[in-house]
Image: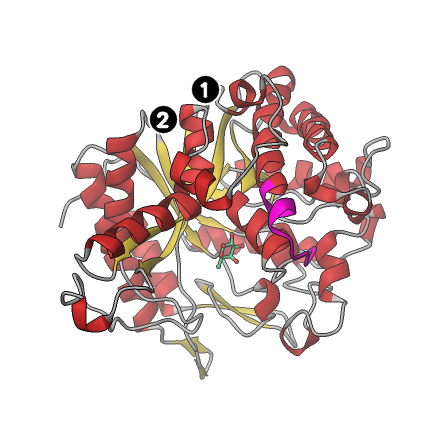
Amino acid sequence: MQTLPDDFVWGVATAAYQIEGAPSANGRGESIWDRFAHTPGKTRNGDTGDAACEHFYRWESDIELMQQLGVQAYRFSIAWPRIFPHGSENPNLAGLGFYDRLVDKLLEAGITPSPTLYHWDLPQALEDDGGWVQRRTAYAFAHYAEVVGERLGDRVQQWWTINEPWCVAELGYFSGDHAPGRRNRKDALAAAHHTLLAHGLGMEALRRSAPAAQIGLVTNVECVVPRSAHPADIEAAELAHQLRNTWYVDPVLKGEYPERASEHYQWDAQPVRPGDMEIISAPMDSLGVNYYSRQVAGDERVDDADRPPPLVNANLPRTTMGWEIYPEGLRDILMRFQQDYELPPVYVTESGVAFADVEQDGAIHDADRRAYLESHFAAAAEAHAAGVDLRGYFVWSLMDNFEWQHGYSQRFGLVWVDYATQERIIKDSGYWFASMVKSS
Ligand code: FCB
């Protein structure tokens, strides 16, 4: 197996709404996820993040758990509605204080804080004002970024602006599977542009208030594989790659939207104002890549009788999310990006897996998760050996948590959480991770 360099950073990731709970503590305002999860029929079993992992109250012992896992860096997100409960007023100092203490304690524990400013919990007040469909939300984000930078920038170096603009736009404003649950293509395209604009404006603002900040965007990518070598399938895979991946990476690294996808949407680019693409493509310090699975794309019009045999195994094992396990996709997508862009340093900002873990006498024997992680770490090492400037890897997730529309049904953690008692148990994969980090 290829190895990763000695200074490679091993971390874990979480997001505020998925773990914190305490939805109205210290003046926190309502977010679109509070509203969405409390709307009947939107999440599995009507689950909400009201309690989640009670991390807001248990953060100190959660940092101790991270120490036991040997974690070197922690990617968490800051809840915008804790800082601006109603969108735009004076910042809520009590909300900032929570992250202030978290950062101090992480540093004390020898763990590098790596915050994300937006992991989907838009203040509901901003959604009431049009949400990401409106340009002003990008400016509100920049103001929020500047305020958080002022408070934490003396101690935090690594920052992430927006988590997964594809999910924000497509799931939030097109499929409606995520908050705010809207379903409109035009709105989704506007939302995509405004989240990217927020990234650019946020980066500018953060550089003002936290001059030492190293800033990146986090994208969720899929390795798109054509169903067969039939030219129509190959063409379909290229389009799918643009819709899913390059729609969000071309603007930041090339200053343009991909053409084929633009034609596909028949997009009039109406939300794009002069100067936007320069703001969006201002140099960033790192690119975050979240990788979970592949996508197989084919042209539905091709008759199966005319289709050559599949290029890759079509029957891969799946996780409880229904996602195919395809570690080589991580290597392939990183190498494709290396070819197609001038990449800044890259981090895998999320990668991990949900399985049906079972507790047995106080232990979780999740050999399948360990195998998943091992194969994905190996794929990352191959990409690194092939020249990708990969600097670190954050496992999703530190602990089991609220998995959005799936509620508490999906367990992604290195640590098991008993939601009735809030007991935490390090899974076998967590112990393995700790020994791997120790020996790396
Ligand atoms: C990613 C999200 C993260 C988590 C994982 C499983 O898309 O960023 O919050 O839900 O998927």
Q: Which residue is mark 1?
A: 283
Residue 344 badge: 2
* Residue 59 is at least partly visible in this image: no
Marks 2 and 1 close (CB-CB < 8 Å): yes
Residue 83: x and y, percent?
A: 76, 38
Left/right of residue 287 with respect to residue 419 in the rendered view: left
Depicted 303 relative to depicted 18: above or below = below
Depicted 173 relative to depicted 319: above or below = above
Rate crowding at label 2 as few (under 14), some (14 to 19) or many (20 or more) other CA atoms within 10 Å.
some
Q: Residue at x 39, y 62 (%)?
A: 430
In which quadrant of the rendered view does residue 367 lie?
bottom left
Residue 270: x and y, percent?
A: 62, 32
Is ligand 1 within 8 Å of the beta carbon of the residue shown at mark 1? Answer: no
Q: Residue at x 65, y 75 (%)?
A: 421
Q: The residue tagged with tag 2: helix, strand or loop?
A: loop
Residue 337: x and y, percent?
A: 30, 36
Looking at this view, is 130 or 333 the one in front?
A: 130
Magenta-colored span: 179-189
Left/right of residue 163 with respect to residue 298 in the rendered view: right
CA separation, marks 2 and 1? 9 Å
Find out whether residue 185 is within the magenta segment: yes
Q: Amino acid at mark 2?
A: Pro
